[in-house]
Amino acid sequence: MESYLRLINMLFSKDEYQNRLKKTKILMQEKGIDLLISQDTNNMNYLTGYDAWSFYYSQCVIVHTDLEEPLCFVRAQDAGGAYIKTYLKNESIIIYDEKYIHTWPTHPYDCLIDLIKKRSWDKLKIGVEMDSHYFTAFCYEKLKQGLPNSTIKDSERLVNWVRLIKSDTEIGYMKTAATISEEAMKVAMNTINPGVRQCDAVAEIQRALFRGTPEIGGEYASIATLLPTGKGTSASHLTATDEKFVKGEATVVELSGVVKRYHCPMARTVQLGKPEQKKIDAMKATNEALNAGIEVTKPGNTADDVAQKFWGVLDKYNIKKESRTGYSIGIGYPPDWGEHTLNIYKGDMTVLKPNVCFHMIAVMQFGDWGVEASESIRVTETGSELFCNFSRDLHIK
């Protein structure tokens, strides 16, 4: 029965999980890492299938170069989720007791250190994800103090880079997520009207994101639906309030459909009432820049090649933009849906390969106003394709 439940809950074949592990071990050897402790929630999912809202407290996946499976280290309360969601054998799920929860200075990493010592791994070269959102300074200090004979080093987003090239199954989930993004954006464009509260519009958007399609439902996104409006369009990452939309103002909508934790984000701009010419011109230049970057998105070119073409258009229109204009995407957990690897930015020489996926987002801000558009893009064998099919023009109502 247990094996059957594991089988029906696996999102990918065991061969795919083993291939991910093999690639991870190869990079570990290249970086001189014997034992990898991965605290990144996305990487835990990628390596084991584990999926639960438990990342607010200590958990990790442990990869040893000689083990045939990773170890999933979770809180006792979350053990059931690990048994259900992962492909791992029971003995590969390591549970720590509730006595470690919020009993400072006792900490779950005390149990993790005991595990490492019992397995005689305390003299190994250990890689940790120094910039992972949920790897705290306290966790790091615990490891340093508890494993004085180990060499602890940054793994430099090792697993994140393994995730860069997607499998066909992953692409399939992202394509379904794209369909949900399209449906939610249609709802946004229909719902945003003068006099409507921002929170009411987002309530309808969220409903669409969770309803998904008749074939598959949606999930929570790793970033809230972003909704800067009016002067707020000159800023980034603003969320809805209970204020009402105003005629004559623009609103930026950034959202993502999610399927099996795979994201496909999209941003569009809607204008309520007749737009000023400067907004029309800015949107036209934005789309021209995005198209220029998309045209050179193909295997063998680099992220820098895409960025150079994008900024070449902006230079033509004398538009200044300091922030990056894209990043790799795939699995996502709060607080971010980016993979923290490839950036579409000048100087990033990452070579594009088939099934590399990124969100190319043009956030264009001018004093007290702005416009925005984006595309989620897949590199194909000969060029690229857009996940979503939704006009990037300024949506005028």
Image (cartoon, rainbow, N blue to C red):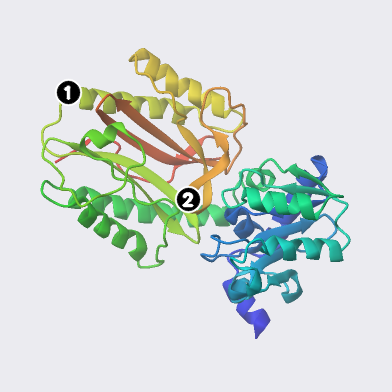
User: Eyeballing the image, is 104 above or below 273?
Assistant: below
Q: Position of residue 381 (x, y in %)?
A: 58, 39
Q: Residues within 10 Å of mark 1 (few under 14, many from 20)?
A: few
Does 179 sit above or below residue 230?
Answer: below
Q: Nearer the viewer, mark 1 or mark 2?
A: 2
The quarter of the picture where residue 79 lies is bottom right
Q: Which residue is mark 2?
A: 335
Q: Amino acid at mark 2?
A: Pro
Amino acid tagged 1: Gln
Of labels 1 and 2, earlier in sequence is 1
Q: Quadrant of the C terminus?
A: top left
The 10 Å Cα crowd at callout 2, few under 14, some 14 to 19, many 20 or more, is few
Name above or below for residue 255 compared with residue 301. Answer: below
Indicate the position of residue 30 as horizontal and vertical percent values. Answer: 81, 40
Mark 2 element type: loop
The quadrant holding residue 92 is bottom right
Asked whether 332 or 58 is in front, the reply is 58
Residue 384 rendering spot, x and y as whole percentages: 49, 37
- State the residue position of label 1: 277
Q: In this rendered view, identify the residue nearer to me: 31 or 264.
A: 31
